[in-house]
Image (spheres, rainbow, N blue to C red):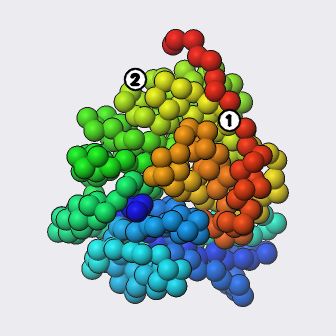
Amino acid sequence: MILTVTMNPSIDMAYSIEDLKENTVNRVSEVRKTAGGKGLNVSRVIKMMGRRIVATGALGGNFGAFIEEQLDKEKINHAFIHIKQETRNSIAILHDGGKQTEILEAGPVLTAQDVFRFLENYKELLSEADVVTISGSLPQGIESDFYAKLSSLAKQKKIKVMLDSSGESLKQTLLNKDKPYLIKPNQEEISELLNIKLNGKENSEILIKYMSNKIFQDVAWIVVSLGAAGAIAKHNNSFYRVKIPKIHVENPVGSGDATLAGLAIAISEGKDDEETLKTAMTLGMLNTMEKQTGCVNKKLFSKYFGKISVTKLEVVNF
Ligand code: ATP
């Protein structure tokens, strides 16, 4: 099975307010509440594609219980540790013709005892996992090398780790002696990591140069997703440019998570590079076509899979 890790899940609340006003009362008639956090988006997409998945992380209080109920409704297996502090809410206000204003709580502060219980639980879950996905930010109370620790524990059991994180926790995991098997930075994340500026118009050659940076040494897969422009990827010494068709986008949020779900599915099933990249891009695209974040229509999979092109790039040594 695929094990997904979400250390700081949230109840994602979407408020639609056509005309948002400051310093007064805004009433909302339509509220959507979903079990959120990047790892839970990954989980939902894997489940929608009919694969075996167990979601883990830390949940607390009534909000944590709400998330578990939602996962039960969606028949997503879960094994979270329970913490004393309340799980957070993340609020997205959709207003004024397409604007999105977000209010994100930092979330609970995990204690040393919580971290210990999580690690014990994680080690047990690893015994049944083929691959592990780790997504999103760390909650307060956890050191930035925590994902590096999770990577090492998985690697000791020869389980592939796929990491979608940013900032210090991504850096620490890359500097760790046990490298993740795969990382999936978007342009912003790779810019931050390498301390460079990307304007979204870089050609493959420049991106290949960045992906060849020493910091990525021994990371088998690097998939840099480029939104509507598809992706550029590196698997060991092979580089690929992935092009996707133009589609109608309903809601692009969570496309990176759907992409990671596709990578986890394909890699856990031993697919070749071309099929792996096409699966990832198809799920990213299918997510943009749905209103709900982290949601895909499985029936459309073959149609869009067939429209993606993967080209192996000739690379002169950098
Ligand atoms: P998020 O942070 O919202 O989860 P991300 O920035 O990590 O997303 P993106 O690069 O935006 O990830 O998107 C991942 C993949 O989803 C893309 O490579 C592509 O396959 C698909 N995708 C995203 N946006 C679009 C779009 N506007 N049109 C078509 N496909 C898209």
The residue under label 2 is 214
Q: In the image, residue 248 lies at what x, y percent?
A: 82, 57
Q: Is the CB–ligand 1 distance for label 2 below 8 Å?
A: no
Q: Secondary structure at mark 1?
A: strand
Say what amino acid the circle numbered 2 marks. Answer: Lys
For the point 34% across and 74% down, the residue is 79
Q: Left or right of 34: which side holds 219? A: left
Disc assigned to residue 254: none
User: Residue at 57% of width from left, 11% of height from top?
Assistant: 316
Which type of secondary structure does the marked residue at label 2 adopt?
helix
Q: Nearer the viewer, residue 260 or 291?
A: 260
Contact? badges 2 and 1 (CB < 8 Å): no
Q: Is residue 47 left or right of residue 121?
A: right
- For the point 53% across and 26% down, which residue is it? 238
The x and y percentages for residue 31 are: 66, 83
* Front tag of 2 and 1: 1
Dot 2 crowding, Cα within 10 Å, few <14, some 14–19, many 20+: few
| Mark 1: amino acid | Val
Nearer to the camera, 101 or 73: 73
Q: Give x and y (percent) for residue 106.
A: 42, 65
Which residue is the site of mark 1? Answer: 310
